[in-house]
Amino acid sequence: MPRMNLDGASALVTGGASGIGEASAEQLAALGARVVIADLNEQAGEAVASRLGGLFVKCDVSSEEDGAAAVAAATEMGPLRALVNSAGLGRAGRTVDRNNDPMPQKDFDFVVRINLLGSFNMLRQSAAAMAKTDPVDDDGSRGAIVNMASVAAFDGQIGQASYSASKGGVVGMTLPIARDLSAVGIRVNTIAPGLIDTPIYGEGEDSEKFKAHLGQSVLFPKRLGTAEELAFMVIDLITNPYMNAEVIRVDGGIRMPPK
């Protein structure tokens, strides 16, 4: 069975304006996919889409209307075969702070709304579009979805309650959704990245020193991972026809300490 052919198909990448999403979009485009970059960052998103010959759609992943617009844009460019759910964010805060005040509920809700509810929103709408396409092989395959969790789903650190809960939810929904979508030939997998060198760490000498320090806690290689390395796994999970219902850590073997 050959790898899934994306030439002439469309692919939707949330958070595609930077980091893992951008790297995934680049590799999807290299395989012949027409890529929709769904992101809130208009300037960066437009630049990535232009460079890849794709399309930018401004998108809050937790918005039903924005999600529908992104999916519609993709289906107009070709049959939707791939979704990469890489939009996400974090907001650090202890459950009870140093003044013994509780974390504001709105802070917890915000992270869960984007990372978990937003991932499901984009997934359900993309899957519905994929289900309406013709199968691409004798197995009845119609598409593949890759969600982005985090090692924080398993090794959540102090101050990561909301982030870990949101990513744990993404891990937990992988198998049941893969089971749901097996009826229409759509595979679902999740990646749990470790420490990845993305714009979140900033730029400059101090930033580089901080990243080098973080890298020492990685088993091997002793550095942060690159967005390109994460995207390699994204592409494997999309194109390997037998990868389904799995959560894969891509983390250099790190196990996060409490803090």
Image (cartoon, rainbow, N blue to C red):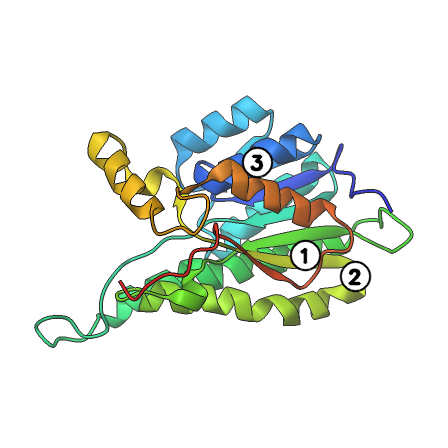
Give the amino acid type for the residue marked by disc 1 in the picture.
Ala
Judging by the rendered image, the residue that carries numbered circle 3 is 25
Q: Mark 2 sits on what residue?
A: 184
Classify mark 2: helix, strand or loop: helix
Residue 233 in percent (x, y) is at 60, 46
User: x, y percentage for residue 92?
Assistant: 26, 60
Above or below: residue 165 compared with residue 256: below
> Would you name the residue on which mark 1 appears?
127
Cβ atoms under marks 3 and 2 closer than 8 Å: no
Say left or right for 105 vs 224.
Answer: left
Q: Nearer the viewer, mark 3 or mark 1?
A: 3
Q: How many other residues sit within 10 Å of disc 2, few (<14), some (14-19) or many (≥20)?
A: some
- Nearest to viewer (mark 3 / mark 2): 3
Left or right placement of residue 207 versus residue 17 in this view: left
The image quarter containing residue 211 is: top left
In this rendering, would 161 be left or right of 86? left
Q: Single out the residue that lies furthest toward the right.
A: 138
Task: Determine contact: label 1, label 2, CB under 8 Å.
Answer: yes
Give the residue type at disc 3.
Ala
Residue type at mark 2?
Val
